[in-house]
Image: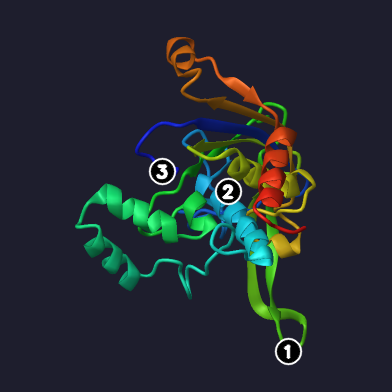
Amino acid sequence: MSGFAEFRNRTWIHAILEMQTALAVGSRLSLDPVGTDMPVIKDPEGKPFIPGSSIKGVVRFQAERMLRAVNRKPDFWACDPFDAPCVDASRKETLWKRAGQNDEIFTREVFSESCTACRLFGSPWMAGRVAFKDARLENHEDLPVWTQIRDGVGIDRDLGAARAGVKYDFETVVPGAQFRIEIVAENLENWELGFLLAVLRMWKEGGIAIGGKSTRGPGWGKLTDIQIYQVTPDNLLDYLSSGQKAERKEDELIEAFMSWWRREGGHA
């Protein structure tokens, strides 16, 4: 099991998300009397950022879609956590009793019965091995403004037209904004890293939207400048003494995933 009990590797994936359209990542209602109805979430300096939870949500969603398209149990599939979780509350209690209330044994049992998505991103009973940091605005000095206010209207579903009296405004980050993405993965096999990078490749091609109102245009961007670094037991002392990490290649890791897939009897 590639859990947390021992250190096998840590991998950092860095990238830049460049927004091609506006970005609507909302906060709660503004307390400003003249503020917008739906403000963008900002840091204490007033700069917009993308919460790590939002990034994790879209990446997990895309990963689950790919896993369900293949659905090869027991090693490559995704459960429906809201309808039919791979380990539900009843099964969790059974495994906890079988493990003699030993956390290490229990985690191993849960891991063995969990789907690929839950093994990577976590479940109610087990921490994920892939973490997503908040994405900070990288080119704030180059942008004339950081956000803009847009108007929105409610649509009458019967008439297909704007409904009277249902008007609001919302704030978006301007197109061209660049956010620094950082993903940290713990104890992933090469094929698991390759699968994660294959999911991110869809984002490189502009095929993943993030934030709200994406069906209306906001939220579309591309990942660029992907860099991958890794620490293993072989270079752990170098990292602890000087911060040195080994660089990994995206194509090599994706090929490791494809090789694993072919070796384990998968099909394209």
Locate the C terminus and report the quarter of the image it occupies.
bottom right
For disc 3, the marked residue is 3
Q: Is 131 placed above or below 225 here?
A: below
User: Mark 1 highlights which residue?
Assistant: 158
Q: Distance between the residues labelled 3 and 1?
A: 52 Å
Q: Residue at x 56, y 63 (%)?
A: 78
Could you tell which of marks 2 and 1 lies nearer the N-terminus? Answer: 2
Mark earlier in primary sequence (3, 1)? 3
Q: Which amino acid does label 2 sit on?
A: Ile
Tell me if mark 2 has few (under 14), some (14-19) or many (20+) residues whose alpha carbon lies within 10 angstroms of its own: many
Image colouring: rainbow
Question: Callout 1, which amino acid?
Answer: Asp
Label pair 3/1, CB-CB below 8 angstroms: no
Q: What amino acid is at disc 3?
A: Gly
At a point 63% along the width and 46% down the height, the residue shown is 196
- Give the spatial CA distance, label 2 vs label 1: 35 Å
State the image coordinates of residue 200 (x, y, percent, origin top left).
68, 45
Q: As rendered, which of 116 and 36 lies closer to the eye?
A: 116
Are there few (<14), some (14-19), or many (20+) residues within 10 Å of tag 3?
Answer: many
Q: Which mark is residue 55?
A: 2
